[in-house]
Amino acid sequence: MPDTRSAAGAATAAPSKTKRWALLAFLSLNTLLFCSLGSWQVQRLGWKKDLIARVQARVQASPEAPPAPAQWPQLGAGDEYRRLQLAGQLLTERSIPVYANTDLGPGYWLMAPLQLASQPADVGANASTNTNANTSADARATAPGVVWINRGFIPTAMRHSPDYARLSAPAAEAERSVQVTGLLRLPPRPHWFSRDNRPAEQRWYQRNPAELSAAQALPTQVTAPYFVDAQQIEPSHTLPAAGGSTAQIWPRPGLTQLQFRNNHLSYALTWFTLALLNIAALIYLLFFESRRARSGPNSRRGPAD
């Protein structure tokens, strides 16, 4: 009589072997994936450390002259946080509040155009609207230029207060000429979650110099493609906080985010740990489980067999 138990064992052996090989392939692919992700995070760790070191070096460097208009098209991430010193006419009456969320809570960055050199205050009224590329290039080469200055942070409650009206009023002639020391910043790149500016509704979410100039009738062709986070403005054009305290002033400068999150080491350790767990599972499957599978049928066979 045929051995029915042997036939049943042979019938179940094939599917079990197929599942084992599928599991081996799955664990091997996971190991490669986790090792790749861990290596990528190690590379990101080196990049982030280098970025932090470069930013700190720029922030602590002596201030330099702003980039010339001929250099504007070449500005990139490598120029961010350069410490600049600029002089010109601060057009406080053309200030624009841009929504911000800082360590001090929600509020606004108070942006104002700095008219470099000796360009007259009503430059916007006489600005040409010709968009011809050659005209724009000629204008950049000859016009003094406009650089938007982030004067600092103001709280939400201040936006519609008399203090805001004072901050955005025309400065006295003797106080219009200022010297600004600050950090070069580029407008953020748009992404899925960024909100677009709505000039018609006076809702500003992005510090985009070209859009700010267009809203204030300033010539966009001579507007620098960067803005400056002011560290110091002389004269200051600030107001003391409520109660006349001199410990806090508005707008509050110096809130540029210079501390960058650097979690790449913990991410790398996580991926490498997952890779090790997969390797342990592979070892178990290849040696212990395979050995048990080979010895299992014989060990379960009784004396009568």
Image (cartoon, rainbow, N blue to C red):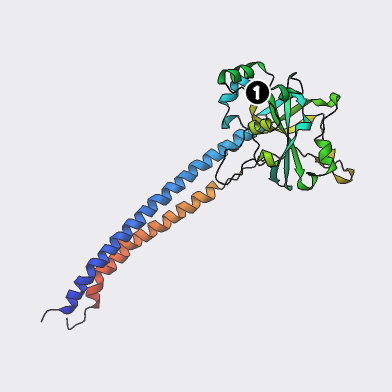
Q: Quadrant of residue 88?
A: top right
Q: Position of residue 222 (x, y in %)?
A: 65, 23
Element assignment for label 1:
helix
Residue behind mark 1 = 222
Report the side of 70 relative to 255 (left or right).
left
Q: Quadrant of residue 296?
A: bottom left
Asked if 76 appears above or below 296 in the picture, the reply is above
Q: Which three-letter amino acid code belongs to the residue tagged 1?
A: Val
Report the side of 109 relative to 141 (left or right).
right
Q: What quarter of the picture does the N terminus occupy? A: bottom left
Asked if 119 appears above or below 95 in the picture, the reply is above
Q: What quarter of the picture does the C terminus occupy? A: bottom left
Taking depth in this image into account, of 268 and 292 the one nearest to the observer is 268
What residue lies at 63% left-to-right and 19% top-to-bottom? 140
User: Number of marks in the image?
Assistant: 1
Taking depth in this image into account, of 36 and 66 the one nearest to the observer is 66
Asked if 93 appears above or below 106 in the picture, the reply is above
Q: Position of residue 196 (x, y in %)?
A: 61, 42
Report the side of 281 relative to 121 (left or right).
left
Taking depth in this image into account, of 193 and 262 the one nearest to the observer is 193
The answer, for residue 155, to whether it is visible in the render is yes
Q: Position of residue 278 (x, y in %)?
A: 39, 57
Taking depth in this image into account, of 147 and 51 the one nearest to the observer is 147
Check the image and name the residue furthest to the right.
244
What residue lies at 42% left-to-right and 51% top-to-bottom? 34
